[in-house]
Amino acid sequence: MKEKFAPSLPEPSRMVHALSQIGYKLENAIADLIDNSITAGASSVLIRFLHDGNRLVSLAIADDGHGMTERGLSDAMRFGSAEDHSKGGLGKFGMGLKLASLSHSDEFSVFTRRNGRNSGKRWTIENLASGWLLETLDSKVTKPVFENNWADLDLGKNGTVVLWDRLRGFPQHKKGIKSGLSLIERRLRLHLGLTFHRFIEDGRVHIKMDQQEINRRTRPFFVEIEPLNPFGYEVSGSERFPVRMRTPAIDGIGHLEFDAHIWPSKSEEKEYRLGKRAASHQGFYVYRNGRLIQAGGWNGLVHDDSEPHSSLARVCLDLEPKLDEFFGLNVQKSAVITPIGFQDAVKASESECGLSWEDYRKASISAYRQSSEVFSQPVPGKGFPRKLQQAYKTENGNEVKLSVSESQADPVEVDLNSRTIRVSSQLRNVGMSKATDSSWHAFTILLFETFSTAFARDSLSKLAEQKLHALNKSLSYLEE
Ligand SMILES: Nc1ncnc2c1ncn2[C@@H]1O[C@H](COP(=O)(O)OP(=O)(O)OP(=O)(O)O)[C@@H](O)[C@H]1O
Ligand SMILES: [Mg+2]
């Protein structure tokens, strides 16, 4: 009789191909290795680019963490290694080291040292495909790795070096290796500075990068990655924020708390711009054990993730270890999958002082709107007395013109389309013919100030309309 269950093992070469295509961006892959270094208690991590003057040959990531024993290394190299993740480290799946490495290299080795004892293992796609054949590296290979200098890292007793060879999918530059490397370094500064900003800020870890030309004996100099705190503004964009908000209880999870922030408008800070388009950086910043997982995005709460009017809104959500089972994580650790009920709970959240989620959204939009008004701050332009123009002059001023017009029904007209305040020639030449220069100046200042808000907003408010009406009524006697 046929057995009901029989093993049906994956076909290794197809499997390896699939695993290497899992969709890691370079910066996510490197961040995954740095997670491991930090969890191993490293105080310094060095990312080293090894090139031959023309192309990138290898990439090494060294750390001065506690390293691994030979047995520990064997387990670490397994797909689905068996580390206990309940202690609040940065690992979760037992896959990061392997998948991140395979996403950008066809061959990777791990050299590690624990209490002065070296071990080394290597995976290649060929050995994986021929039936998961893990290679053990002998001391002739491992020893020189630890004799090498790794910037200012001390690997004398403990430490780990992950080496990627036969690289794949690295960003390139048509101007050659130097430009290619500076492109990569720029991307890493941004991504790693952001992802690990809390660790870098409090000195728990230093992340460094250097470049070494192989077969040259020069000692490369390293640069250190600076922290980029996405909440690192000096003055809030709205007086009532930031505030801590609390959701109603979500089934099985309980209350969630998060901090609702509003950036000051028009910020040029690198922490606000985060590369280029700040609008695409609004939304949730989700941290897991201090490491930033998700940098922006509304997780379905808001229709458009980069709607310019809500650019200033950033929410800080810290996931404690006990929430790990409720919030999903993609393998690349670049986004969280929120639990059922999350969106409704956030929409119903409130601060202690009674601010609602809607109040927060509105405050962030209004902070943004006010800023666009400042940008288009009207200034008196052509037709206004020259002294007045000079007195208001600003760099970004949005000019409003003054003209005297022959044919118009009312003494004063406000034309938003042509951005002009028109005074009838009747008023100017007849009614104000005896006016001195200074009283004409004063009159134009008052006209300008009365309607400047309308030009800033590009619309006449009810109040402005009433003022215009009242003004015309009282000025009409001057025209007679
Ligand atoms: N730099 C390192 N120093 C010390 N131990 C390490 C290092 N890198 C990996 N390890 C060990 O190897 C194990 C496997 O690492 P891997 O990144 O594959 O999985 P993980 O970190 O456990 O989970 P995740 O898939 O979420 O990253 C780790 O749990 C850790 O025990
Ligand atoms: Mg890991």
Image (cartoon, grey):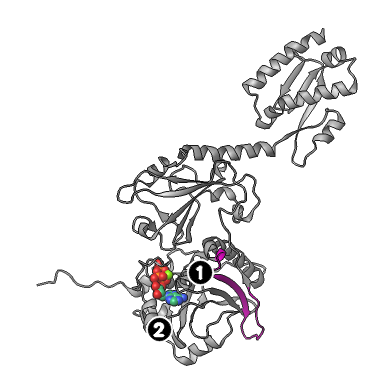
Check the image and name the residue furthest to the left: 1
| Boundaries of the magenta span | 200-222
Which numbered circle lies on residue 69?
Answer: 2
Which quadrant of the picture is home to ligand 1? bottom left
Q: Secondary structure at mark 2?
A: loop
Q: Alpha-carbon distance for marks 2 and 1?
A: 23 Å
Front-most of residues 16 and 121: 121
Front-most of residues 336 and 21: 336
73 relative to 237, above or below:
below
Any atom of ligand 2 within 8 Å of the CB at mark 1? no
Front-most of residues 163 and 294: 294
The image quadrant of residue 312 is: top right
Residue 240 pos. (x, y %): 55, 41
Q: Residues within 10 Å of mark 2 (few under 14, many from 20)?
A: some
Any atom of ligand 1 within 8 Å of the CB at mark 2? no
Judging by the rendered image, the residue that carries numbered circle 1 is: 30
Query: Which quadrant is the C terminus positioned in?
Result: top right
x 56%, y 74%: residue: 47
451 relative to 395, above or below:
above
